[in-house]
């Protein structure tokens, strides 16, 4: 897929030329997407909005470095995930988990230390699992993290990822496989140290 | 993990039937026989399930408060263009470089001061060796010792000159 000649490329070139209307269009086009990516990772609505602002500020300052090798969304996605990890680093993962705005029902269940009645995973276990997977994902590179999140969280196929990133399908498969292996090894190390 | 599985791992994990029929069938057969591959695939399936938990909930309304764009622009104006100093202040690597540079500057400073002192000490030791034996106590004070000696010499010369003048005056009076 050619990312240099699309309608999106024309929009990016206008933003690179500091066209404020074009930048506004980018923000309006992607703000909901960015917000839901951040919320999915952090589960904190207030911080999600703050980080979303930071993401678009980064987009504004860095758009001159955008090289059209990937789609704009892929590029923004990577910035968004990096900003989430910056936030996690600053606030410390463990502290964040307990500050997340999980539901009232979850909180009550946690206080009572009772298993979920509907057969689903209890809230405290869910939080611990989120904590674990966020920690594991911090052990792989930014590119690997974005790729596996685009695949598993956003639900893109290998073919779509190839189109979005400008890489060929085999490269995507190899990168995903290596990422999965790294995650398994990191999980093994974490289990041994506990 | 064996090659048969490695190449089809994405299809295996997604449960996709889209892979080329025979090879995917081979992969599944291999998985049924190979404990090592089966265990690794199981681990990957569990992790995939955990990663999918990072999806925003279905009922999540991704609605930002009105005026989001204005707040983004405010932030951009407040941050301004990225300064080179931000690299040192904001990034952990930059901070480490700054701390290392300070530590290095401190070490160099300490070295320079101690080196100067030792040079001064050796100069003084040399000077005290050059002075006459009777003046070593004064020389211990520091470099001006020599000047004191010269002043003393001058005073001695002056007093002997005065004595000669006094003798001449006395002689004329007589």
Image: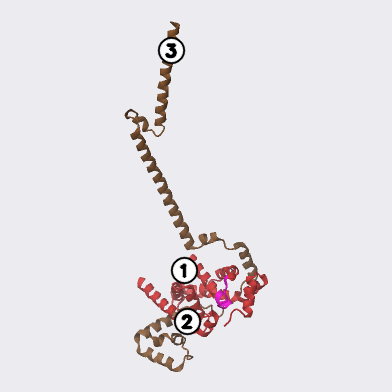
In the figure, the shade used to draw chain B is brown
Quadrant of the rendered structure where residue A94 is? bottom left
**Are the two marked residues, 1 and 3, in contact with CB atoms closer than 8 angstroms?**
no
Q: Quadrant of the C terminus of chain A?
A: bottom left
Q: Are marks 2 and 3 on the same chain?
A: no
Crowding at dot 2, Cα within 10 Å, few <14 / some 14-19 / many 20+, comes out as few
> Closest to the observer: A25 or B165?
B165
In the figure, the shade used to draw chain A is red
The residue lying at 62 percent from left, 80 percent from top is A6
Is B80 positioned to the left or the right of B96 in the image? Answer: right
Is A57 positioned to the left or the right of B24 in the image? Answer: right
Kindly report the distance in space between the C-alpha atoms of the residues bearing marks 2 and 3: 113 Å
Label 1 belongs to which residue? Answer: A93
Chain of the residue under label 3: B
Kindly report the distance in space between the C-alpha atoms of the residues bearing marks 1 and 3: 99 Å
Q: Relative to residue A115, is residue B101 depicted above or below?
A: above
Kindly report the distance in space between the C-alpha atoms of the residues bearing marks 2 and 1: 32 Å
Label 2 belongs to which residue? Answer: A171
Quadrant of the rendered structure where residue A4 is? bottom right
Nearer the viewer's eye, disc 2 or disc 1?
Answer: 2
Is A174 positioned to the left or the right of A17 in the image? Answer: left
Q: Is residue A74 covered in magenta?
A: yes
Label 3 belongs to which residue? Answer: B166
Q: Relative to residue B80, is residue B32 depicted above or below?
A: below
Q: Relative to residue A21, is residue A154 depicted above or below?
A: below
Q: Which contiguous range is marked in magenta?
A: A65-75
> Closest to the observer: B7 or A132?
B7
């Amino acid at each position: 897929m050619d990312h240099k000649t699309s309608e999106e490329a024309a929009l990016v070139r206008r933003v690179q030329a500091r066209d404020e209307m074009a930048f506004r269009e980018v923000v309006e086009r992607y703000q909901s997407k960015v917000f839901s990516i951040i919320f999915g990772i952090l589960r904190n609505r207030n911080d999600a909005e703050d980080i979303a602002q930071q993401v678009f500020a980064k987009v504004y300052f860095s758009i001159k470095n955008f090289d059209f090798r990937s789609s704009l969304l892929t590029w923004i996605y990577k910035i968004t995930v990096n900003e989430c990890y910056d936030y996690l680093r600053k606030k410390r993962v463990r502290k964040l988990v307990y500050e997340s705005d999980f539901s009232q029902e979850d909180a009550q269940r946690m206080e009572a230390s009772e298993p979920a009645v509907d057969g689903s995973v209890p809230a405290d276990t869910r939080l611990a699992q989120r904590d674990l997977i966020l920690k594991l994902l911090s052990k792989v590179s930014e590119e690997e993290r974005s790729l596996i999140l685009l695949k598993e969280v956003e639900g893109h196929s290998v073919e779509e990822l190839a189109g979005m990133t400008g890489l060929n399908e085999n490269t995507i498969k190899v990168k995903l496989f290596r990422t999965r292996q790294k995650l398994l090894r990191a999980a093994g190390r974490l289990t041994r140290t506990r | 993990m064996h090659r048969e599985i490695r190449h089809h791992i994405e299809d295996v994990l997604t449960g996709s039937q889209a892979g080329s029929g025979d090879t995917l069938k081979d992969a599944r057969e291999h998985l049924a026989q190979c404990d090592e591959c089966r265990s690794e695939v199981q681990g990957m399936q569990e992790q995939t399930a955990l990663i999918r938990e990072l999806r925003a909930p279905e009922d999540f309304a991704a609605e930002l408060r009105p005026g989001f764009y204005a707040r983004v622009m405010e932030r951009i104006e407040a941050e301004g263009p990225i300064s080179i100093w931000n690299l040192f202040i904001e990034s952990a690597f930059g901070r480490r470089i700054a701390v290392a540079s300070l530590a290095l500057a401190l070490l160099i400073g300490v070295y320079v001061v101690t080196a100067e002192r030792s040079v001064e000490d050796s100069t003084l030791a040399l000077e005290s060796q050059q002075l006459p034996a009777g003046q070593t106590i004064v020389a211990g004070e520091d470099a001006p010792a020599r000047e004191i000696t010269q002043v003393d010499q001058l005073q001695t010369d002056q007093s002997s000159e005065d004595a000669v003048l006094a003798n001449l005056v006395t002689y004329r009076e007589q």
